Image: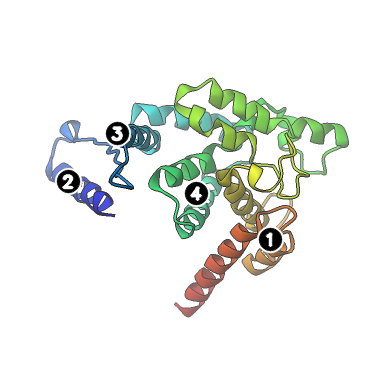
Amino acid sequence: QAAHQIKTSIKEVITKYNNSRKNKLYAVNLTIGYSTKGTKDQDIEEVIKEAEEYLKHQKLLNQNSSHSAIVSAIMATLYAKSQETEDHGQRLGRYCQMIGKQLGLEQKCLSELYLVSKLHDIGKIGIDDRILNKPDKLTAEEWEIMKKHPEIGHRIAMATPQLQHIAEYILYHHERWDGKGYPRGLKGEDIPLVSRILAVADAFDAMTEDRVYRKGLSKEVALAEIKRNAGTQFDPEIVKIFIDLMKNEILMAAAR
């Protein structure tokens, strides 16, 4: 907590400095990575390595970073090719962060969650446009092709050094709690936590988002559907956390 406050204070000073400069060419751009010792006996080299990993993640999220240009280029290709939108990625990122913070995840994991929320469907770049944008139900053959996008996305991430740390989460984001998902049929806690969180958030946003061929469901109806699939499609603990968070958000919005 103290380290995060120090980071925030430094960023505020830099923002204030940049705002005071007339010539924006001389603006300071700083990405900060940090980590703290969890115990007195923890190896300092391990802490430094964690800080470096966190810094790497932050550079990918920093819009002014050259590392972020890689993410932007991939996303631009995906947006141009399919019905994926930037708004979907932003909402998904917010939902994933809400769940992650409620679970008490470390900042490194929260950063990975946010990055995966934007890049989980990058494998759709390798799927035929006619299948991606087909308004009607896919045929059995087309569905088998569509199901390959997590593996394609995994290969893209593994081929991109800056994204290798999230490749596994991309591969498994369509696995199901009951083991009936794809591509590997993983079950329960064998599925990475980040992928389990993403599955709930992604399903909710997909149901509530308006599409060309249908109107989105209300948040209440979508939450009921998520709850109905707890323990089969979704991790029941994550479902409970998400429903509680969203119901509280709905109540707060109604009270305004």
Callout 1–callout 4 Cβ contact below 8 Å: no
Q: Cβ–Cβ below 8 Å for labels 4 and 2?
A: no
The span from disc 1 to disc 4 (Cα, nearest Å) is: 18 Å
Are circles 3 and 1 on residues that touch, CB within 8 Å? no
Disc 4 designates what residue? 93
Q: Which residue is mark 1?
A: 226
Task: Locate the C terminus and report the quarter of the image it occupies.
Answer: bottom left
SS assignment at label 2: helix
**Can you give x and y, in whole percent of width and height, for residue 156 in the image?**
57, 24
Q: Is residue 81 above or below residue 200?
A: above
> Closer to the observer: label 3 or label 1?
3
**Label 3 environment density (alpha carbons within 10 Å; few <14, some 14–19, many ≥20):** some
Image location (x, y in percent) of residue 137: 82, 44
x and y percentages locating residue 240 in the rendered image: 61, 64
The amino acid marked with disc number 3 is Ile
Residue 110, horizontal then vertical, whole percent = 44, 47
Disc number placed over residue 48 in the picture, else none: 3
Task: Give the Cα distance between marks 2 and 3.
Answer: 32 Å
Give the Cα separation between the discs numbered 2 and 1: 45 Å
Q: How far apart in space, not on screen, are marks 4 and 2 (Cα)?
A: 28 Å
Badge 2 or badge 3: first in the primary sequence: 2
Q: Which mark is residue 159?
A: none
Of all residues, the one furthest to the front in this rendering is: 41
In-front residue for pair 40/53: 40
